[in-house]
Image: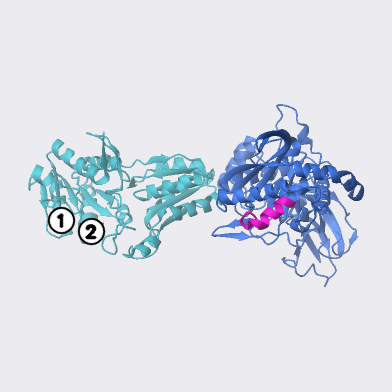
Chain colours: A blue, B cyan
Amino acid sequence: MAITVKMPQLGESVTEGTIGSWLVKPGQQVSKYESLVEVITDKVTAEVPSPAAGTIGELLAEEGQLLTVGQPICTLDVAEGDSPEPDAPQPTDEAQPMPVVSPSVVAAGSQPIDPVTIPLSSISSPPAPPQVEGFISPAVGALAAEHGVDLALITGTGFEGRITKRDVLLFLEGAPASPGEPTPPLPASPTAPAATQAAPGQRVVLSPMRRAIAEHMVRSRKTSPHAWTMMEVDMSGVATARAAHRERFRQTTGVDLSFLPYAMQATCRALRAVPSMNAIFDGDAVVLQRAVNLGLAVSVPDGLIVPVVKQADRYSIAGLAQVAAELIDRARAGKSRLEDVEGGTFTLNNAGALGTVMSQAIINQPQAAILVMDAVIRRPVAIGDAIAIRPMMNLCLSFDHRINDGAAAAKLLGTVKGWLEAVDVETPVY
Amino acid sequence: MAEVTYVEAIRSAMEEEMHRDDRVLLMGEDVGAKGGVFGATAGLFQTFGEERVIDSPLAEAAIVGVAIGCALAGLRPVAEIQFLDFIPPAMDQIISEAAKIRYRSNNDWSCPMVIRAPCGGGVHVHGALYHSQSLEALFAHVPGLKVVMPSTPSDAKGLLLAAIRDPDPVCFFEHKALYRSLREEVPEGDYVVPIGKGRVVREGTDISCITYGATVHEATTAAERLAADGIQVEVIDLRTVRPLDREIIVQTVRKTGKVLVAHEANLAVGVGAEVAAIAAEECFQQLDAPVMRIGGPEVPAIPFAESLAEVYCLGPDKIEAKLRELAAY
């Protein structure tokens, strides 16, 4: 029995992925869960596992090709009786395996989209006339005929993935919202997209990550009434403690001790003190989160990624430093796993590492707030009646005013500040 | 220009036309001494006297029949039916006589008359069974009748002047929720809005919402909400439901490719069906989605209870939801 393996949903809000490297060949025997192909999404790179043991039939997608969730990627000949993973929600002759890295990636509300637009079977045989699946409305048909548009090049955004008139018009305008245009094969490493080397005047087609960021930021600003507030923190204690522990810390853990784990621990304490900041707005309710899963905004080429330290409040300073270092390294190397970027309940952004002193971040939906630690700068401050030079840091909080008011924001910032200013050499690191 | 309400615009149109043309006369229940139950003829009895502002018996067939006789005798009668719900007794006169006189007389005679009637219902109007119906489709079906349903004070005045001057019978239906809720600057003097011409209330590129009467305002509110999400809805006020402005329907449908027809009257065999048919017949190649309609449910009348009236009536929320459905198609 031949089954079709389809593009799985590779994470919350992910609707498409680019085929990376094929890990199998036609005719190859594979066991159940064996990795078939690498898929690059705007969030992570993941490997698609085989839904059953069998023999690979035809590869239906080429490396570098952008596929929508639910589109076929290959066929698999399965021995009779050896059905695909029984708990996977699929008809018997089709299989949409869960990605290898996460057992719970299908987020509520993000339905897989049915196959659209490109009949993949025709890709490998170029002379075949392009066909388009899904309903072609009279308007779309007429427009395509008038302008000589090949509809197979357009990805539909309408009902059940159909191509809308608007999709055709945007395609004709050459707008980047036509992701179905032939995608140039991506380089093996997604960390070095060609887009970053664009020359002035060049029109740079959005990478999946860039597109997802754009969509997310607009949605966030539309969804949440952003309020912003800031407090100053005297980092003298942290600076002293850091200087005292840094050398030995490096020797024992192999990681540099920065301000970040201190700020992370302070943030976790503060989130425990102000649970409404570790919460999600859900229509008529605010859902307080049990765990403190602290997201860290990490800049990567052509975008940013937010790996999440799960249960961050359970770690020591050293633990936070190590976990954060691992996550950040993986993100910068383009090797974040799906689980790395999921489940965040609050985001901390260490923009200060880039030298900024006052930042207005956009909330990482559906979280309640985002905290930015800006650069630690030595500057004069009044201490009692004297003026002293102190390493000062601005803590900037953008919060969803639907969930919290200024008082809660001040309490959160005040708790972080209080905790950081209380740090001294005696503060436990390990 | 003075800011006036919808009902004041109607009153002033009749007053101006009665000054201008002494063939114009009014008749109906309580239109004289009382000035009409909604005040649409207030003061006209005092100005023009009982020969030109005639209090009729409670007999709709007689009101229309007398008006037909006046029209054939060279006058320009404006007959008021107190509520559109009361018009059924006059249907024979309207459909079998007024509408057919030109045809029956081989174009020797015509019947220049206006039948004014308040229509519609909804929350705060408390129409219920005998004071809420939207019956325009009954009349729009009949060749020989024109049916006008203005949505603004300016249109009410301009279209009423056009209706009185029209050489054939015109049904002029006024939504009573608009009478005192709308106020705008209305051109003074001889301001005529041609019958059979719609207007673009709001330009848009993504969806056309074609409507008329009080629903125009609900559709516009819904359109503004969608605009916040970058969906541009073109709102068309038909103004006249017979004859329909085919040109404006075709233009907007060809432009957007997606159509929602909205009206308070129930859908079956309604004006929306006719508009949908025009869109399908004339714009098939430009359609990008099924032509959709939204209207009152299949219920005999708008309920009296405010909560139930709200369920019956359209309102911006329901129109918005339908427009979003269309946008997502």
Image quarter in which the C terminus of chain A is found: bottom right
Q: Residues within 10 Å of mark 1 (few under 14, many from 20)?
A: many
Q: Which of B239 and B69 is in front in this view?
A: B239
Place of residue A328 in the rendered image (x, y in percent of width and height, measured from the top left): 80, 46
Q: How far across and how far down the image is residue A227, in percent? A: 57, 45
Residue nearest the viewer, comparing A84 with B285: A84
Q: Which chain carries label 1?
A: B
Circle 2 crowding by C-alpha within 10 Å: few under 14, some 14–19, many from 20? some
> Magenta segment range?
A265-278
Tell me what residue is drawn at x 57 percent, y 48 percent: A224
Indicate the amino acid at tag 2. Ile
Give the quarter of the figure containing the N terminus of chain A: bottom right
Q: Is residue A39 left or right of residue B74?
A: right
Q: Is residue B57 left or right of residue A230?
A: left
The residue lying at 61 percent from left, 39 percent from top is: A170
Pick the residue in front: A355 or B290: A355
The amino acid beneath tag 1 is Glu
Q: Mark 1 points at which residue?
A: B29
Q: Is the magenta stretch mostly helix, strand or loop?
A: helix
- Which is more foreground, mark 2 or mark 1? 1
Residue tagged by mark 2?
B87
Magenta region includes residue B155: no
Which image quadrant is residue A35 in? Answer: bottom right
